[in-house]
């Protein structure tokens, strides 16, 4: 299986740039994610972290009223 993939990739000009581009995209994504986590407001983090613990019936009743 690898022989078929390797053979096709050898025919592409400048194929060595694709791993570098994918690494760069991966690195930039996690740097931006890290920046967002560091700069996020504590109130927002606390509110979002409590979402799984909240009871859905309370919110449904509030929406009806």
Image: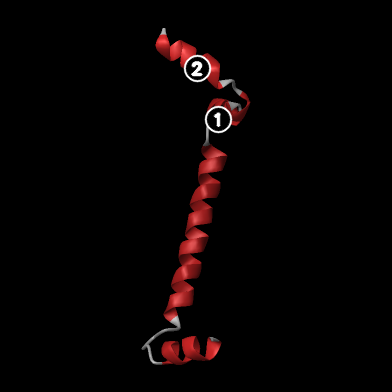
Which mark lies nearer to you, 1 or 2? 2
Checking the image for residue 22, the label placed there is: none
Q: Is residue 7 above or below residue 55?
A: below
Q: Is residue 4 above or below residue 38?
A: below
Q: Residue at x 48, y 86 (%)?
A: 5
In the image, 18 versus 40, the foreground residue is 18
* Residue sitting farthest toward the left: 13
**Colouring chosen for the image of the structure:** secondary structure
Give the mark, 1 or 2, whose residue is nearer the N terminus.
1
Badge 2 element: helix
What is the total number of numbered labels drawn onto the structure image? 2
Task: Give residue 50's quadrant in the image.
Answer: top right
* Residue sitting farthest toward the top: 65
Checking the image for residue 48, the label placed there is: 1
Task: Give residue 65's quadrant in the image.
Answer: top left
The CA distance from mark 1 to mark 2 is 15 Å
In the image, 9 versus 35, the foreground residue is 9
Q: Residue at x 52, y 35 (%)?
A: 40
Q: Is residue 34 above or below residue 5?
A: above
At label 1, counting other C-alpha atoms closer than 10 Å, the crowd grade (few under 14, some 14-19, many 20 or more) is few
Q: Residue at x 47, y 17 (%)?
A: 60
Q: Is residue 8 above or below residue 28?
A: below
Badge 1 element: helix
**In the shown orientation, is residue 26 left or right of residue 63?**
right
In the image, 10 versus 36, the foreground residue is 10
Q: Position of residue 39 (x, y in %)?
A: 52, 38
Quadrant (top left/top right/bottom left/bottom right) for the N terminus: bottom right
Q: Position of residue 53 (x, y in %)?
A: 63, 26
Q: Which residue is mark 2?
A: 59
């Amino acid at each position: 299986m690898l022989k078929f993939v390797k053979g096709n990739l050898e025919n592409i000009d400048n194929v060595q740039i694709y791993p570098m581009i994918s690494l760069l995209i991966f690195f930039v994504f996690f740097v931006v994610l890290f920046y967002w986590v560091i700069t996020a407001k504590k109130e927002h983090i606390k509110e979002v972290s409590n979402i799984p613990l909240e009871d859905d019936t309370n919110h449904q009743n509030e929406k009806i009223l």
